Image (tube, rainbow, N blue to C red):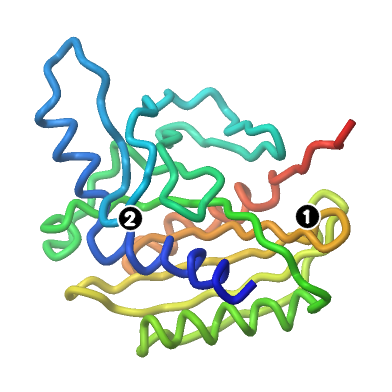
Amino acid sequence: MKNKIAIIVSVIAVVVAVGIIFYFIQKNKAPSNSVENTTPPSQPEVNNQITPEPSQGKLVTDDFEISLPEGWRKTAPAVGASAMAVKADEQLTDPAAQKINFKSYFAVSYDTLQEKSLSEYLQSVKSQLQQTISDAVFAQEHDTTINGKAARAFEASFAQQGVNYKILMVAVQGAGDDVWVISFNTLQSTWTEYQKVFSDIANSFRLKLKK
């Protein structure tokens, strides 16, 4: 589980460290009649052949579905994530964020609790995040329920490459030992704008019944 937590944390740390640069590099390189590549950078073995999909209200996988608000697009997930979406047409005014072409995003990842409680599991996540990003500050940790499933959430703030970030991480307990981690990231300056959007997306998360 420790290795998986490290991968989940890297979905936050690596993507925010360099933004979604690769997405825009490939978009600018691609001919007008070609498929745009939307793969996040710096993670090896990412499937970079997945075409971004226009928002149709939901991001659906074999295991779950989650709201995909207008203006958000599904993209090829970083290694360790089951699904990922970015605010594709976001226009940020922060010069440092513009420099790295950062876009607000959310990612969904799967892990197992290995007999830990949600609180204990998230403590492990926070410890790993603190090791990766030493100035991370945590707040607003609380229990909640999402579509009948026990969940626990926390917020965190940190800075990288001159950019101030704010994240929301929600862990949802599935069947048995399953846990699904939904991580949202934006700038501290746009947190107020996205706070309700992130909450609504998280509360829309619904696991599919296994047949």
Residue 7 percent across, percent down from the top left = 48, 65
Q: Residues within 10 Å of mark 1 (few under 14, many from 20)?
A: some
In the rendering, which numbered label is found on residue 206?
Answer: none
Q: Residues within 10 Å of mark 2 (few under 14, many from 20)?
A: some
* Residue drawn where x is 68% and y is 57% of the image: 180
- Residue carrying label 1: 146
Mark 1 or 2: in front is: 2
- Residue carrying label 2: 43
* Residue drawn where x is 42% and y is 23% of the image: 54
For the N terminus, the quadrant is bottom right
* Residue drawn where x is 49% and y is 58% of the image: 184
The residue under label 2 is which amino acid type?
Gln
Where, by quadrant of the figure, is residue 35 drawn?
Answer: top left
Judge from the rendering whether residue 140 lies leftward or rightward of residue 159; answer left or right: right
Q: Distance from label 1 to label 2 (Cα)?
A: 30 Å
The residue under label 1 is which amino acid type?
Ile
Sequence-earlier tag: 1 or 2: 2
Most foreground residue, 200 or 32: 32
Is 14 above or below relative to 74? below
Q: How many marks?
A: 2
Judge from the rendering whether residue 15 lies leftward or rightward of residue 162; answer left or right: right
For the C terminus, the quadrant is top right
* Labels 1 and 2 touching (C-beta < 8 A): no
Is 133 above or below relative to 14? below
Residue 38 percent across, percent down from the top left = 30, 36
Where, by quadrant of the figure, is residue 22 drawn?
Answer: top left
Residue 172 percent across, percent down from the top left = 73, 60
Residue 171 percent across, percent down from the top left = 68, 64
User: SS of the residue at dot 1?
Assistant: strand
* Residue drawn where x is 55% and y is 82% of the image: 126
Is 28 above or below relative to 194? above
